[in-house]
């Protein structure tokens, strides 16, 4: 019996071998596709479905690619020939919300925005806010260690998960972590699994750490600067001033021009870069005033609004970046992080790389936490070697500045060849050995993260 037949025998209709399902499972939102179709997509609806799939995969030594909504940008959820794609998207129930303990227990397939819409009814909130929050799953957010616009103030996924239920490669179910605020019993395997990109096990449940919805007004500031370096230096000055904006986003001239074009807005002054900053909480207006003064001293042309609609409109300009890039061609959305004080130097490096390779690299940054998204735009489906050469230069520049290869999108298949360079051989080996303890047969997401090819 083939593995697909064994899956259908055990699990019935949730095993999908239709051409459309197999084709869709070949790619995530990175645009990168696997070389061919996987053998089946299993739409798990229960923990038992996941366990049975993994037991069959172990007994037949068949690789398994776990998948949430497929919005990842590192190729981590792409299923290829000979592989089972195990989707947790249908496991989307909320099992518990406790306002007293500020926790929610959820299945992995619930969409981030759907969860937050339900939590808002109780005045609660799960802070991680990837720009993909309307379309990405909480399980995918956990497996990638996702961040977002608000994370400089409210933290990333790693700060907002207390415990995880994990199905191992052989089908055993583990309950990691705790539901208490404190807890240091044993090794912190919850933290190990966050950001592990489907290579250690299948997340089938999560105990999330909630906050109460922030009350008070919100102020939104925009500041235009004559150059991206000046904008980056101003954002570093805001951080150094001790102010704590909830959002601090930087758009360089090329991204600002592309978004204005897409939205039909008047074009900004050529070369101008913009910071968009939001303050919140009871002291929002006072904090906005202090930040405005810092921005003006740094040479910015500043506007401030307390009007909710106008604030949302200003932030919508930043949120339209992905669509603006998609309108220009195929995009490799990169994701490097540097210490916040190194942001101006990283923009100098990007300018150097643009000149060296004769390309424009529209770049936005979560400036509040030093996380940059340089966009490489090209024609055709595959990333040309010249673009990889420029990206290689970019990654090395970030590492030289004390930064890291990925701030929030993960390694997946697209960055695995650079991983050893950042980790060093000893740490690469140690991490790989940890992967082997969880998955001795190497059937979970092979070729991702720890591939040196
Ligand atoms: C328009 C757009 C904007 C984005 N903005 C952001 C942003 O602001 N911040 C950010 O961090 N990311 C962003 N992303 C990237 C992406 O949305 C996130 O990485 C998201 O967390 C992926 O969730 P997903 O459900 O789509 O996971 P998938 O893409 O399906 O999977 C991602 C990885 O997680 C693994 N995985 C998924 N589910 C499980 C599970 N249950 N158990 C174990 N492993 C699992 C997969 O194997 C894969 O390695 C953006 C993407 C798009 C398209």
Image (cartoon, rainbow, N blue to C red):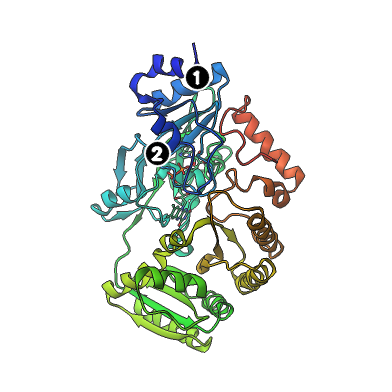
In terms of depth relative to the viewer, which is nearer, 373 or 150? 373
Can residue 162 be seen here? The reply is no
Q: Give the residue displayed 66% in from the left and 60% down from the top.
A: 390
Image location of residue 69, percent across then percent down: 41, 42
What secondary structure is found at the residue carrying circle 1? helix
**Marks 1 and 2, how far apart in space?**
20 Å
- State whether residue 202 is above or below residue 339: above
**Residue 55 — which label?**
1
Question: Label 2: which residue?
Answer: 108
Can residue 413 be seen here? The reply is yes
Image location of residue 145, percent across then percent down: 51, 49
- State whether residue 132 is above or below residue 264: above
437 horizontally vs 249: left or right: right
Q: Determine if the C-beta at disc 2 is less than 8 A from ligand 1.
A: yes
Image location of residue 122, percent across then percent down: 25, 52
447 horizontally vs 409: left or right: right
**Residue 376 — which label?**
none
Q: Give the residue displayed 66% in from the left and 71% down from the top.
A: 355
- State whether residue 280 is above or below residue 450: below
In terms of depth relative to the viewer, which is nearer, 213 or 235? 235
Dot 2, how many residues are within 10 Å of its Cα: few (below 14), some (14-19), or many (20+)? many
The quarter holding residue 52 reads top left
Dot 1, how many residues are within 10 Å of its Cα: few (below 14), some (14-19), or many (20+)? some
Image location of residue 351, percent across then percent down: 63, 72
């Amino acid at each position: 019996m083939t593995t697909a037949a064994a899956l259908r025998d055990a699990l019935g209709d949730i095993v999908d071998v239709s051409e459309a399902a197999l084709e869709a499972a070949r790619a995530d939102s990175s645009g990168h596709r696997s070389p061919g179709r996987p053998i089946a997509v299993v739409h798990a609806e229960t923990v038992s479905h996941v366990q049975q799939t993994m037991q069959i995969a172990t007994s037949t030594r068949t690789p398994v690619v776990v998948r949430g909504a497929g919005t990842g940008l590192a190729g981590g959820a792409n299923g290829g020939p000979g592989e089972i794609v195990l989707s947790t998207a249908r496991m989307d129930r909320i099992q518990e919300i406790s306002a007293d303990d500020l926790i929610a227990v959820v299945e992995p397939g619930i969409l981030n925005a759907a969860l937050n819409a339900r939590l808002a009814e109780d005045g609660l909130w799960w802070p991680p806010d990837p720009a993909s929050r309307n379309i990405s799953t909480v399980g995918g957010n956990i497996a990638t260690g996702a961040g977002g616009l608000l994370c400089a103030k409210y933290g990333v996924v790693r700060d907002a998960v207390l415990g995880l239920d994990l199905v191992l490669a052989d089908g055993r179910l583990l309950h990691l972590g705790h539901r208490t605020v404190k807890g240091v019993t044993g090794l912190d395997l919850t933290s190990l699994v966050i950001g592990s990109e489907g290579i250690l096990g299948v997340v089938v449940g999560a105990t999330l750490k909630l906050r109460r919805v922030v009350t008070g007004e919100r102020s939104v500031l925009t500041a235009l600067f004559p150059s991206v370096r000046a904008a980056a230096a101003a954002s570093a000055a805001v951080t150094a001033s001790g102010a704590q904006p909830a959002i601090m986003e930087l758009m360089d001239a090329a991204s600002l021009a592309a978004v204005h074009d897409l939205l039909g807005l008047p074009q900004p002054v050529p070369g101008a870069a913009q910071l968009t900053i939001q303050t919140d909480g009871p002291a929002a207006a006072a904090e906005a005033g202090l930040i405005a003064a810092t921005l003006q001293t740094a040479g910015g042309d500043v506007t401030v609004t307390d009007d909710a609609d106008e604030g949302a409109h200003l932030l919508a300009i930043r949120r339209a970046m992905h669509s603006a890039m998609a309108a220009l061609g195929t995009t490799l959305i990169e994701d490097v992080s540097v210490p916040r004080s190194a942001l101006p130097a990283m923009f100098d490096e990007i300018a150097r790389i643009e000149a060296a390779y004769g390309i424009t690299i529209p770049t936005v940054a979560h400036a509040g936490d030093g996380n940059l998204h340089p966009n490489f735009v090209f024609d055709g489906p595959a990333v040309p070697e010249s673009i990889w050469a420029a990206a290689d230069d970019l990654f090395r520049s970030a590492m030289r500045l004390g930064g890291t290869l990925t701030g929030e999108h993960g390694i997946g298949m697209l960055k695995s060849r650079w991983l050893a360079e950042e980790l060093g051989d000893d740490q690469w080996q140690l991490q790989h050995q940890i992967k082997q303890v969880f998955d001795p047969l190497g059937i979970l997401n092979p070729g991702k993260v720890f591939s040196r090819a």
